[in-house]
Image: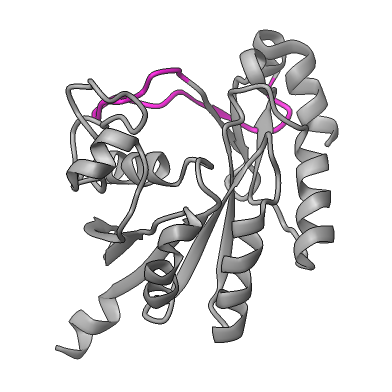
């Protein structure tokens, strides 16, 4: 029993509305193998809705109004993943969820940066001493550059930022993400909504193939 308890981790995904929290939840479930096809949040007539948006009102409006818990396995751990409502009207549910988690994943919209609900939820996490990991989302859209986003997080939230990964390009020129710990780049492929695909990996920060393929965006990422 003790071994099973130690295997389990519970974390919540928090953000301001429309930062991409439920979509990120869906991708985590997809890449963990818990689901085989990722659903859609926005499209009301979509064949598949997001797994965590199970209530009819959530499917119709494309928002989360109640917290949902999903379970997946990663390596030797059993992960309980909680997708929480972002809208302030349903924030009491989110506050209750944050009393029962080991950590929180805070999603930041790279276009809008730090937003009001982000600040409120961070205050709740800080009051309880909850560890926080930040995920900057939507780099494949027209957004602020990563240095600006990092500076805003440090100024607005008063937290030191240590990036684990770094984007190569952004918007229409977003090519992928460089992992600083593993010294390799994961190439971005638009529309990855099914499990089973093999990600293209390019090893090393000073990879000549990556520099040739991705040009100025890769050179800029190297310098940053």
**Which one is in front, 71 or 218?**
71
Residue 17 lies, with reference to residue 6, above or below; the image says above
Q: Is residue 54 left or right of residue 133?
A: left
Q: Quadrant of the N terminus?
A: bottom left
- Is residue 67 in sight in this rendering? yes
State which quadrant residue 173 falls in: top right
**Which one is in front, 160 or 74?**
160
Picture residue at 49% right of the left edge, 66% below the top: 104
State which quadrant residue 171 falls in: top right
**Which one is in front, 4 or 10?**
10
Q: Quadrant of the C terminus?
A: top right
Point out the residue furthest to the front here: 89
Q: Is residue 40 left or right of residue 182?
A: left
- Is residue 209 in sight in this rendering? no
Point out the residue furthest to the left here: 1
Task: Locate residue 190, reporting x and y percent.
Answer: 45, 17
Picture residue at 65% right of the left edge, 45% below the top: 180
Task: Locate residue 187, reporting x and y percent.
Answer: 52, 24
Q: Magenta stretch: dominant SS?
A: loop
Q: How many marks?
A: 0
Residue 181 is covered by the magenta coloring: no
State which quadrant residue 215 falls in: top right
Residue 75 lies, with reference to residue 98, above or below; the image says above
Task: Locate residue 213, reporting x and y percent.
Answer: 65, 9
Task: Locate residue 133, reporting x and y percent.
Answer: 57, 61
Q: How is the image coloured?
A: one colour
Magenta residues, start to end: 189-207
Q: Is residue 34 left or right of residue 108?
A: left
Picture residue at 27% right of the left edge, 74% below the top: 8
Picture residue at 61% right of the left edge, 58% below the top: 118
């Amino acid at each position: 029993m003790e071994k099973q308890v130690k295997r389990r981790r519970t974390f919540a995904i928090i953000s301001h509305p429309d930062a991409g929290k439920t979509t990120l939840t869906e991708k985590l479930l997809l890449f963990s193998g818990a689901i085989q096809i990722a659903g859609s949040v926005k499209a009301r007539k979509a064949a598949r809705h997001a797994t965590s948006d199970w209530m009819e009102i959530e499917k119709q409006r494309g928002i989360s109004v109640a917290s949902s818990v999903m379970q997946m396995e990663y390596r030797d751990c059993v992960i309980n993943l909680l997708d929480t409502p972002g809208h302030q009207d349903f924030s009491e549910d989110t506050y209750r969820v944050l009393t029962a988690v080991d950590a929180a994943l805070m999603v930041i919209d790279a276009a809008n940066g730090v937003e009001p609900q982000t600040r409120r939820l961070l205050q709740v996490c800080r009051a309880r001493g909850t560890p926080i990991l930040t995920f900057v989302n939507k780099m494949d859209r027209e957004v602020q550059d990563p240095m600006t986003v990092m500076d805003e997080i440090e100024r607005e939230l008063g937290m030191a930022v240590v990036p684990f990964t770094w984007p190569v390009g952004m918007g229409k020129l977003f090519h992928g993400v460089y992992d600083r710990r593993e010294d390799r780049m994961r190439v971005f492929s638009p529309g990855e909504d099914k499990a089973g695909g093999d990600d293209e990996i390019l090893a090393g920060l000073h990879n000549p193939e990556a520099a040739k393929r991705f040009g100025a965006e890769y050179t800029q990422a190297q310098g940053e």
